[in-house]
Amino acid sequence: MKIAICPGSFDPVTLGHLDIIERAAQLFDKVIVLVMTNSAKQHMFTAQQRTDFLKRCIHLDNIEVDTYGGLLVDYAKEHNAVAIVKGLRAVSDFDYEFQLALINKSLYPKMETLFLPAKGENMFLSSSMVKEVGCLGGDISSFVPGEIKEDIYKRCKGDK
């Protein structure tokens, strides 16, 4: 069984994230969407909330959602994953993700990293932009899954 991991903070999950996840699910027998903890980021939603959002938005049988706070390669070894799948929006994404891919490869040589380019309509889309637009009262319905839109608006208003 070929297992891939789609790691990210998903704070919150966007339609761009879902596109990459669903495309990865067509390439692999199993995809684990891994909600990672990034100490350099101030998250709007807890890891549990982000995991719940993903579970509510994903409707394919070969995708599971998990959380992890350690090294991605350690999780990959533990779950027999053969690949990390990352979405790229722009050249600037590639520079950072390429560095991570090289570090991951040196830590776990059996692991490959695959980059999937974002669809044109998602090239500009980021969780940060979604939060900014949502908290300023803008319409985010074309950026996020309908299942979580109201949760984002509530958090922007200060509700937990």
Image: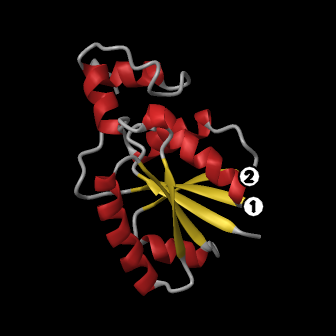
- Image quadrant for the C terminus? top left
Determine which of the numbered discs, if any, sits on residue 29 in the image: 1
- Residue 139 in view: yes
The image position of residue 63, as x and y in percent, is 67, 51
Check disc 1 and give the amino acid type.
Answer: Asp
Q: In front here: 34 or 157? A: 34
58 above or below 102? above
SS at circle 1: loop
Q: Please name the residue shown 43% across and 23% down the image.
A: 151
Q: Please name the residue shown 56% across and 24% down the image.
A: 147
The image position of residue 47, as x and y in percent, is 42, 47
Does 70 sit left or right of 132 as displayed? right
- Image quadrant for the N terminus? bottom right
Q: In front here: 45 or 140? A: 140
Q: Please name the residue shown 22% across and 57% down the image.
A: 40
**Total number of numbered labels?**
2
Identify the residue under disc 2.
62
101 above or below 138? below
The image position of residue 73, as x and y in percent, is 47, 75
Check disc 2 and give the amino acid type.
Answer: Asn
- Residue 158 in view: no
150 above or below 105? above
Q: In front here: 124 or 45? A: 124
Among the 4 quarters of the image, the one containing residue 96: bottom left
Dot 1 and dot 2 residues touching (CB under 8 Å): yes
Q: Please name the residue shown 35% across and 37% down the image.
A: 127
Among the 4 quarters of the image, the one containing residue 58: top right
